[in-house]
Image (tube, rainbow, N blue to C red):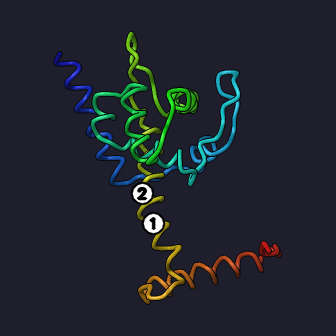
Amino acid sequence: MIDKARAANRRLLDIQRAGQGCAIETALWERISQPSLEEGRRTGAIRFGDKRVMALAGALCVALNTVIGFTNKSLRASVSQLLGGPYSAAQMTYDLRKLRLKGLITRIPHTNSYTLTPEGIRFAITYTKLGHRVLPPLLAANQQPAPIGLQRALNTIENYVGNYLEHAKLKAAA
């Protein structure tokens, strides 16, 4: 019993640590967001911005799921609620398979429960923070009445990317 409590405490501390400095390195981002061959099996991409993926990441961020683990049924209920519509057991099974093969979750031995890996925690928090806190203000920055500081920052980024493309002699996408 003490071992279970310590493991739960360790996972909670991992979540808190990941939440403070959640960043996904390029290799992990590419592995997650691209289709791949994992354990000899084709594995679909976990695409940022896809409504179902974003709901899945949000459901995985629930601390209780990460600390004590989650089942197909318990996670499916959270994802369905975040989607605001039906989410079948088959869809959940498919998504759990992708998460497991990508190394984002592990199955708890001798149970039907899963826990997030450290990479899985970073994935869930990064996708959720980017999708809810970073992108919406940036996408609204060129619309009035966006704060002047945000408009200036967006213009700086636009100028930097434009200069980089010009220097690299790459044409901007039409």
In the image, residue 62 sits, relative to residue 157, either above or below, namely above
Amino acid type of the residue that numbered disc 1 sits on in the rendered structure: Val
In the image, residue 144 sits, relative to residue 55, either above or below, namely below
Q: Mark on residue 1?
A: none
The span from disc 1 to disc 2 (Cα, nearest Å) is: 7 Å
Image x and y of residue 144, in percent: 48, 88
Q: Mark on residue 134?
A: 1
* SS for dot 2: helix
Q: In which quarter of the image is the N terminus?
A: top left
Name the residue nearer the viewer: 138 or 86.
86
Tell me the crowding category of disc 2: few under 14, some 14 to 19, or many 20 or more residues within 10 angstroms, Cα based. some
Quarter assignment of residue 28: top right
Image x and y of residue 113, in percent: 38, 21
Tell me the crowding category of disc 1: few under 14, some 14 to 19, or many 20 or more residues within 10 angstroms, Cα based. few
20 relative to 139 in the view: left or right: left
In the image, residue 163 sits, relative to residue 100, either above or below, namely below
Number of numbered discs:
2
* Residue denoted by label 2: 129
Name the residue nearer the viewer: 56 or 23.
56
Amino acid type of the residue that numbered disc 2 sits on in the rendered structure: Lys
Q: Quadrant of the C terminus?
A: bottom right
Quarter assignment of residue 9: top left
User: What residue occupies the far front of the structure in this picture?
Assistant: 85
Image x and y of residue 11, in percent: 30, 34
Circles 1 and 2: CB atoms closer than 8 Å: yes
Name the residue nearer the viewer: 34 or 6.
34
